[in-house]
Image (cartoon, rainbow, N blue to C red):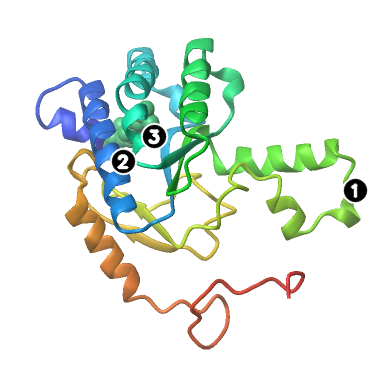
Amino acid sequence: MDGNGRWASRRRMPRVLGHEQGVEALVRTVRACAERGIEYLTVFAFSSENWKRPEEEVSGLMKLVLVAVSKHVQQLAEAGVRIHIVGDRSKVSDKVKASWDQAEAATRHNSRMVLSVAFNYGGRWDIVQACRRAMADGLGPDDLSEATLARYMALSHAPDPDLFIRTGGELRISNFLLWQAAYAELYFTDCLWPDFDAGQLDAALAAYAARERRFGDVKPATAPARTAEEV
Ligand code: FPP
């Protein structure tokens, strides 16, 4: 969800107001995805590296979590959305932790759509925490395979993404879903995140529909190829 800062700066507003509009864009997008039958949406809200930002912006983002959860979670719950928070919760404040617990608890019986919010998340962090947890469970080198490690990844509740959208014009994935996005179709748009809406989503979906997915095979596939272990 890149581009909040630039969106605000162009209007001579503090960056945190761009993040506020980013929350509105997120709620809009969740609804648009649910309406289109998309069952899993994962968003990058705060990276392991975002702590490097000015203190004012970091604390503004943390406050925004509390406001966003109290303002929007009930409506999302009523719309059938289940929320999962993925990332390292050990470094966030007790208030933010409680907010995330509330969002997960209020939506845990829902099944229309799963919204995973990556917060204090990094793709490399995820791979390391998965290895650590697998080792703590007593798995040795011979037990480890792609399928077993996948069970320890933070997004083990969701299938690998089909489509990876980055707004804001940068052409990189910045440590998001490194493991899971192996075969995702990448879509980059100059649209700044606060301007993202159903029309932008439809443009991304149309681009995705025109892609030919081969998963390493020579002919197009309709579903993700299974690994040798799964076959
Ligand atoms: C990147 O834009 C955006 C972020 C680091 C924060 C994204 C967060 C939100 C949309 C709010 C989500 C909040 C909740 C409660 C889930 P940027 O600041 O890097 O923009 P820039 O590249 O224009 O500077």
Q: Is residue 182 left or right of residue 228?
A: left
User: Image quadrant for the N terminus?
Assistant: top left
Nearest to the observer: residue 15 or residue 193:
193
- Residue drawn 35% across the image and 19% down it: 70
Mark found first going from the N terminus, 3 or 1: 3
Q: Residue 15: give x, y in percent of width and height.
A: 23, 24
**Contact flag, marks 3 and 1 (Cβ < 8 Å):** no
Identify residue type, mark 1.
Gly
Secondary structure state at the residue bearing disc 3: helix
Above/below status of 140 relative to 214? above
Question: Seen in the image, is 167 located left or right of residue 12?
Answer: right
Query: Of helix, strand and loop, which one carries label 1?
Result: loop
Does the residue at mark 2 contact the one at mark 1 (Cβ under 8 Å)?
Answer: no
Which image quadrant is residue 146 in? bottom right
Relative side of 222 to 134, left or right: left
Q: Residue at x 53, y 23 (%)?
A: 101
Q: Which quarter is ligand 1 in?
A: top left
Question: Alpha-carbon neighbours of circle 2 within 10 Å: few (<14), some, or many (≥20)?
Answer: many
Q: Give the vertical position of 36 relative to 231 (above or below).
A: above
The residue tagged 2 is 2
What amino acid is at disc 2? Asp
First of labels 2, 3 by sequence position:
2
Amino acid carrying mark 3 in the image: Ala
Cα distance between the residues tagged 2 and 1? 39 Å
Q: Residue at x 55, y 61 (%)?
A: 182
Checking the image for residue 140, the label placed there is 1
Residue under label 3? 77
Q: In which image quadrant can residue 11 be found?
A: top left
Q: Nearer the viewer, residue 28 or 219?
A: 28
Residue 200: x, y in percent? Answer: 21, 55
**Closer to the N terminus: mark 2 or mark 1?**
2
